[in-house]
Image: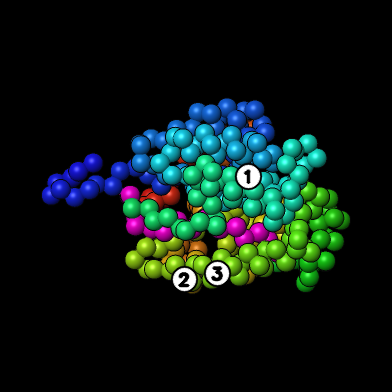
Amino acid sequence: MTGRGGKIDPVGDLLAISDLHISYAENKDIVRDLRPGAPDDWLIVAGDVAEQVADVEWTLGLLAERFAKVVWTPGNHELWTMPADAVQARGVERYERFVELCRKLGVVSPEDEYPVWEGEGGPARVAPMFLGYDYTFRPEGAATKEEALKIAHASGVVCTDEYYLHPDPYETRDDWCRARVAHTEARLTAAADPEKPFVLVNHYSTSREPTRVLRYPEFAQWCGTELTADWHTRFPTAVMVYGHLHIPRITHYDGVKFQEVSLGYPREWRKHGHPHGLLRKVLPVRERV
Ligand SMILES: [Fe+2]
Ligand SMILES: [Fe+2]
């Protein structure tokens, strides 16, 4: 659209959603109806699309046809290797399958150059990240990963990742996380530009703070890493977009907006409907929607 003075007016919105969990038929129906509001809308998909590779392909393919750009980052569910999945790849190999799939579909993954959003609230550099967790969001009384896990097992709150999310060829999920953090930190350092602040995108919040409201504090150990605690202040950041907690809301830490954009399971959204809408507007940051 051309505005007064021949300048190009930004059109479209930078939108986000996560935790589509399309193995639930009702969620798949919702995804089938997701459409942009304007032809230039971008969509961030912050993980937990589905467990099966074919379901992830169906979803990202559909969204890539509709939105001007789709940016994806993996959740823990994509990285589960379920016995029923035709693709039995584990760990890094599984993640790389998804990156390949994204390239085929024209979807931006954490392994691509970070695209710059020039529309409303921009310019901003959209940085999809795959960071994982390292059991450092430990419950009270636990000084080590082993102690944290012991408390979780005693209370019966154990993340299914322990059974299906394999870190191969890394020995542990926390080893994989530390490698991902180092890799991502170097990329953010190289791309940092205060003129184009980051839209940080990760399945988990980079700050532990959002996990403080979890009903079961033992679960936080599967929700991120202390290694990224200061990233929203260390790097120029417009907003941090995350999911996983299934607690959609906006909070601010050190003046930076953190936005949880999950759809969640039908049993969760049936209770309250979708008070924040389905597609959450990420920019401009002044809008507290
Ligand atoms: Fe989820
Ligand atoms: Fe998740």
Residue, far left: 5
Mark 1 and mark 2 lie on one chain; the one further toward the N terminus is 1
Identified by mark 3, the residue type is: Glu
Identify the residue at horizontal 28%, vertical 47% (top origin).
10
SS for tag 1?
A: loop
Q: Position of residue 191 (x, y in %)?
A: 44, 67
Q: Quadrant of the N terminus?
A: top left
Up the image or down, 179 lies above or below 32; here it is: below
Label 1 within 8 A of ligand 1 by Cβ: yes
State if disc 2 and disc 1 touch (CB < 8 Å). no
Residue 48 marker: 1
In terms of image quadrants, where is residue 226?
A: bottom right
Q: Nearer the viewer, mark 3 or mark 2?
A: 2
**Residue at which label 2 appears:** 190
**In the rendered structure, which segment of residues is drawn in magenta?**
119-135
Identified by mark 2, the residue type is: Ala
Up the image or down, 126 lies above or below 30; here it is: below
**Residue at which label 3 appears:** 185
Identify the residue at horizontal 47%, vertical 58% (top origin).
113
Identify the residue at horizontal 85%, vertical 61% (top origin).
150
Q: Is residue 187 visible?
A: yes
**158 magenta-colored:** no
SS for tag 2?
A: helix
Observer-nearest of 283 and 195: 195
Observer-nearest of 137 and 179: 179
The reply, left or right, for residue 213 in relation to residue 219 is left
Counting other residues with Cα less than 10 Å from the Cα at mark 2, is it few (<14), some (14-19), or many (20 or more)?
A: few
Q: Nearer the viewer, mark 1 or mark 2?
A: 2
Q: Is residue 245 visible?
A: no
Magenta span dominant secondary structure: loop
